[in-house]
Amino acid sequence: MILEHAILQVRPGQSDSFEAAMAEARPLVTRQPGFQSIEIRPSSDDPTRYLLLIIWDRIDSHRERFRQSDDYQQWRILLHEFYDPMPVVNYYGPSIFHD
């Protein structure tokens, strides 16, 4: 299991539009092979910052499948105009603790 992590910095004044676009874009990722779950959490300190967490079965499900798909092109059209700067995506392995 792999955790995809990104901080999404949204242009000021665009948070409501971003959230609506994310709601529209969400099914594009949730139907991907290897997708497990998604969370988008708004920052408590900054109304223009969001935390994106997606769990995949493996990195290639994101990098090779989703990012090469037509669904990803639609995801980009819906969401990438909101970001400043563009997010950096990081991947993390399984938890070392299991509660």
Image (spheres, rainbow, N blue to C red):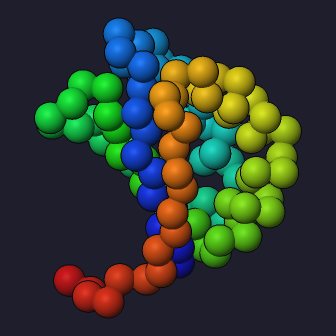
Check the image and name the residue furthest to the left: 45
Q: Nearer the viewer, residue 30 or 86?
A: 86
Residue 28 percent across, percent down from the top left: 67, 38
Which residue is depicted at the point 51% across and 63% down?
A: 90
Which residue is depicted at the point 34% across and 38% down?
A: 50
Residue 19 percent across, percent down from the top left: 42, 23
Residue 2 percent across, percent down from the top left: 53, 73
Residue 67 percent across, percent down from the top left: 76, 51
Numbered marks: total: 0
Q: Nearer the viewer, residue 20 or 83?
A: 83
Q: Nearer the viewer, residue 87 or 43?
A: 87
Whether residue 37 can be seen here: no
**Left or right of 15 on screen, residue 34:** right
Q: Is residue 19 above or below residue 88?
A: above
Q: Is residue 97 above or below residue 40?
A: below
Look at the image and tell me in which quarter the C terminus lies: bottom left
Which residue is depicted at the point 47% across and 74% down?
A: 92
Q: Is residue 58 above or below residue 46?
A: below
**Left or right of 45 on screen, residue 88:** right
Q: Quarter-wise, where is residue 25 in the image? A: top right
**Left or right of 25 on screen, residue 70:** right
**Left or right of 92 on screen, residue 15:** left
Q: Nearer the viewer, residue 72 or 57?
A: 72
Which residue is depicted at the point 23% across and 37% down?
A: 43
Whether residue 81 can be seen here: yes
